[in-house]
Image (cartoon, rainbow, N blue to C red):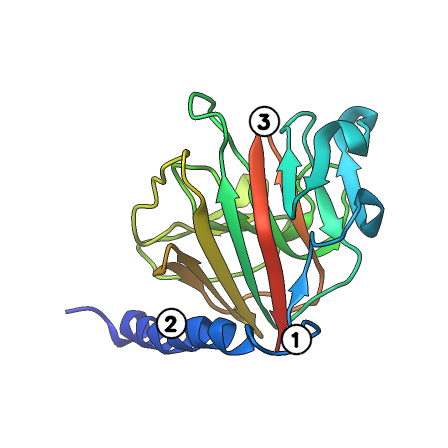
Amino acid sequence: MKKLSTILPVIFVATMFSSVVAEEKAVTDQPKSELQFLFRDASLEDFDFFLVDGGKKEDVFKIEDNILKITGSPFGWLATKKSYKNFFLFVEIRHPNPEEIANSGLFLRLTENVGTFLPKCIEIQMHKKTLGDIFGFHGVKLCGSPDRFAFVEEKNLHKVVRDLDTNVDPNEWTRVAVLCHEDIIVVYVNDQVVNWAWNVDSSPGQIAFQSEGGEIWFRNARILEK
C-alpha cells in the first residue's frame, strides 16, 4: 500500500488539473487580456536572451506565425521580460527533425542569469524521451515522491523524474501544460498528468525557452496568471 504522503499529492494533482483544463476552456471566449499569448504579434525585441560564446539572438531564435523556432546551437535561452509566480502555462511543442537527438526545456521562475546556459530556475524537461522531468538548478529547491526524487549534490541539483512514459511522436505537435501555484508544480502532457513537485521555491521569475543542441518549435504559448 502506498504511503499517505505519496497518495495525497496525486489526489491534489488530479483535482487541480481538472480545473486547469476547465480554466483554459473557460477563458477561450473571454477578452484576450485574460490570456497572454507570448508569440502572437511578437518580435525578438520583446524578449530577453542569453547565449554562450556571444551567440546572436537572431541566428538561434525566430518567431513566425505564432511559432518560436529554435535552432539549438549555441546553447542558451529566450525569456519573457515579465516575471511570473502563480500561473497556468499552455504550449505545444514539436521536434521537426525526427533523426535528431533534440533537447530543450521550459524554464520557470528564472531568477538569475549565472553566466551559463542553465540559469537559476526550475526546468520542465522537453527532451523527447524524458519530457516532463522537473529540475531545480543552482540550489532551487523542490520535492517529490521518494521513488522519483533525487538531489545531485555535486551539481546542486534537485530533480523529480516523470511518473509516466512521455516518449512522444516528433512528427506531431505535443500539448504541454504546467501549473505553478505557490510551492506546487504540476506537468501535463497530452491530457495526462505526468509529473508533480511540492515544496518548490516560489520566488517569481521569468519564463524561458531553451536552446540545447537540437531544433525545437514552440507554438501557441499562452499564460493565464492566477
Q: What residue type is labelled 1?
A: Glu
**Viewer-side residue, 143 vs 178:** 178
- The numbered mark, 1 or 3, whose residue comes first in the sequence reads 1
Residue sitting farthest toward the left? 1
Which residue does the image show at 71% across and 36% down from the upper left?
Answer: 62
Quick check: marks 2 and 1 in contact, CB under 8 Å?
no
Residue 137 vs residue 93: left or right? right
Which residue does the image show at 42% across and 37% down from the upper left?
Answer: 128
Mark 2 to mark 1: distance in Å? Answer: 24 Å
- Residue 122, image x and y in percent? 59, 54
Can residue 214 be spotted in the picture? yes
Q: Quadrant of the N terminus?
A: bottom left
- The numbered mark, 3 or 2, whose residue comes first in the sequence reads 2
Q: Residue beneath label 1, please?
A: 34
Q: Image height check: is 199 above or below 103?
A: below
Eye-nearest disc, 1 or 3: 1
Quick check: marks 3 and 2 in contact, CB under 8 Å?
no
Binning the other alpha carbons within 10 Å of mark 1 as few (below 14), some (14 to 19) or many (20 upward) gives some
Which residue does the image show at 30% across and 55% down from the upper left?
Answer: 147
- The numbered mark, 2 or 1, whose residue comes first in the sequence reads 2
- Residue 144, image x and y in percent? 41, 61
Binning the other alpha carbons within 10 Å of mark 2 as few (below 14), some (14 to 19) or many (20 upward) gives many
Q: Residue beneath label 2, please?
A: 13
- Residue 51, image x and y in percent? 76, 33
**SS type, badge 1:** loop
Q: Which numbered marker is on residue 213? A: 3
Q: In which quarter of the image is residue 36?
A: bottom right
